[in-house]
Amino acid sequence: MFKPVTVVTGESIARYGFGNGHPFGLDRHECFIREFVAQGLSEQVRRVAPRAATLNELQAFHTATYIELVQQKSLTGEGFLDRGDTPAFRGIFEAASAVVGATLVALDSLMSGNSHRAFVPIAGLHHASRAGAAGFCAFNDIGVAIELLRSQHGVQRIAYVDIDVHHGDGVFYAFEADADLVFADIHEDGRHLYPGTGARDEIGRGAASGVKLNLPLEPGADDSQFMLAWQEVEAHLQRYPSEIILFQCGADALAGDPLAHLAWTPAAHAHAAQRLCAIADYQGHGRVLAMGGGGYQRNNLAKAWNAVVAAFLAREP
């Protein structure tokens, strides 16, 4: 039976963003929503509201010391949470907690069986580490979701697929030696772009060696190069079957993004989402949770993210 696609939207996650012309501005959620409504997709999904993650949930991934730092900076709104990429603002703790909570709401919809696919536009903050912020990311909702899948839902093998233009370093290094976190990441080569990591020879450590796949692309790579890399992702996911797929679908690899140098179109996102659904169904669980991630050209993110939702809604003939 076809189950509804869950999409988590709301003002609390819209507040996660930075002012003063920052690329990760406060308008990104609304840009998604306008296109979501214009395409008629909003009427075809199960829309649910975010909630705030609890302290216990945040501590599943982050250290208590770091969480306290975010709380303190949130009161004053002064300075940075890291060395200069992630500004503090008044209420950043609440906004970042809502992003984590939104991902957990989407996760609950999958694990309860209410949906097989779910999407959260302001989510997928893949740079934050267990003990610090990085790259516009205060809390790592993906890391929290992975830890809670294990502790609360009894899920062992999790697949994480990342097509954001930036390497998902906060996830990769936190689980580099975790043999049950299957990792596949297509991104611009770190020799040309932040965070400078994700070389092809980074394949995991110890028992996890070979379970991690990093596929760096040269500047200018278009959909044809994406499709070649994607074939490797599919083979990797088939080699290591999972019980759920987490999909960070950042839109900053599309042509014209101000922070990167790749040249994909939204067709890349549509193809990735469609194929992940097929793989999830073939593996018997059907669960795919997509998170919007990066994307700093507003038309690009609106088109790419809605291409993912549309692919989730497509039914097999």
Image (spheres, rainbow, N blue to C red):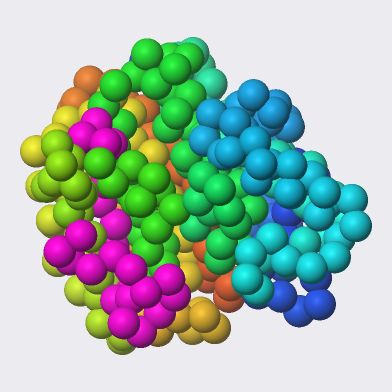
| Horizontal side, residue 119 vs residue 232: left or right | right
Q: Quadrant of residue 219?
A: bottom left
| Horizontal side, residue 31 vs residue 4: left or right | right
Q: Residue at x 17, y 54 (%)?
A: 203
Residue 196 in magenta?
yes
Percent of width and height locating residue 210: 11, 47
The C terminus sits in image quarter = top left
> For the magenta stretch, what is the residue range?
178-202
Does any portion of residue 263 appear in the rendered image? no
Question: In this orientation, which residue lies closer to the viewer: 38 or 144?
Answer: 144
Q: Residue at x 65, y 45 (%)?
A: 66
Percent of width and height locating residue 313: 44, 38
Question: In this orientation, which residue lies closer to the viewer: 259 or 191?
Answer: 191
Q: Residue at x 37, y 64 (%)?
A: 167
| Horizontal side, residue 56 vs residue 259: left or right | right
Percent of width and height locating residue 147: 45, 28
Query: Relative to 234, does residue 293 appear above or below in the rendering?
Result: below
The N terminus sits in image quarter = top left
**Residue farthest along the right direction in this orientation:** 76
Percent of width and height locating residue 184: 25, 51
Question: In this orientation, which residue lies closer to the viewer: 49 or 160?
Answer: 160
Does any portion of residue 83 appear in the rendered image? yes
Q: Residue at x 70, y 46 (%)?
A: 96
| Horizontal side, residue 88 vs residue 148: left or right | right
Residue 199 in magenta?
yes
Query: Relative to 69, does residue 187 appear above or below in the rendering?
Result: below
Query: Which secondary structure class fits the magenta region best?
Result: loop
Q: Quadrant of residue 59?
A: top right
Count of labels in the image: 0
Q: Quadrant of residue 187?
A: bottom left
